[in-house]
Amino acid sequence: MQKRNRAAEKKSGRAIVPSIAGAVCGLLTGVVLFSILAAVLCKVDVPANMLTLLATGAATLSVIPASLVFAFLYGEKGMLYGLLIGAICFVVIAAAAWLQGQTAFTALSVIKAITMLISGALGGLLGISAREKRRRVH
């Protein structure tokens, strides 16, 4: 009985480092992408309706490295955890929008959710693939 409890504790504690590394990687990627976007927007006149799409693209692209790093370090169920990371990122962005007073759930919100889920799953799949490739080489 004690062996099972220790194994469960060991497995649950194993996700802490990959979670932190994935979050840091996703945040750094987001900062870099939004900085590039801001620099481009300072130089180029972009229509207002394009700003939302560009910001959605930058946020979606920042989910890929977050889920990739998590899946690479964790080593299993990359697509599932990638979907979870995409869902968490969408909830954080939706909560931030809600705090700004944008309470309407529009078709663009659905598109944001779908793209973040897909990019999270893709990052998780790539992370597991990279881990397996590394395992086969050595």
Image (cartoon, grey):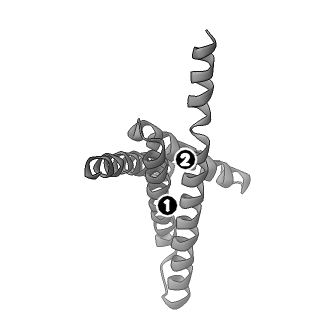
Q: Residue at x 41, y 37 (%)?
A: 76
Check disc 1 and give the amino acid type. Ser
**Residue identifier under label 1:** 62
Which label's residue is closer to the chain start, 1 or 2?
2
Q: Residue at x 61, y 53 (%)?
A: 93
The residue at the far bottom in this view is 43
- Quadrant holding the N terminus: top right
Check disc 2 and give the amino acid type. Pro
Q: Position of residue 102 (x, y in %)?
A: 66, 53
Q: Position of residue 101 (x, y in %)?
A: 71, 54
Res 104 seen here: no
The residue at the far front in this view is 138
Counting other residues with Cα less than 10 Å from the Cα at mark 2, is it few (<14), some (14-19), or many (20 or more)?
many
Res 13 seen here: yes
Residue 28: image quadrant is bottom right
Q: Residue at x 45, y 44 (%)?
A: 82
Relative to 78, does residue 25 appear above or below in the rendering? below
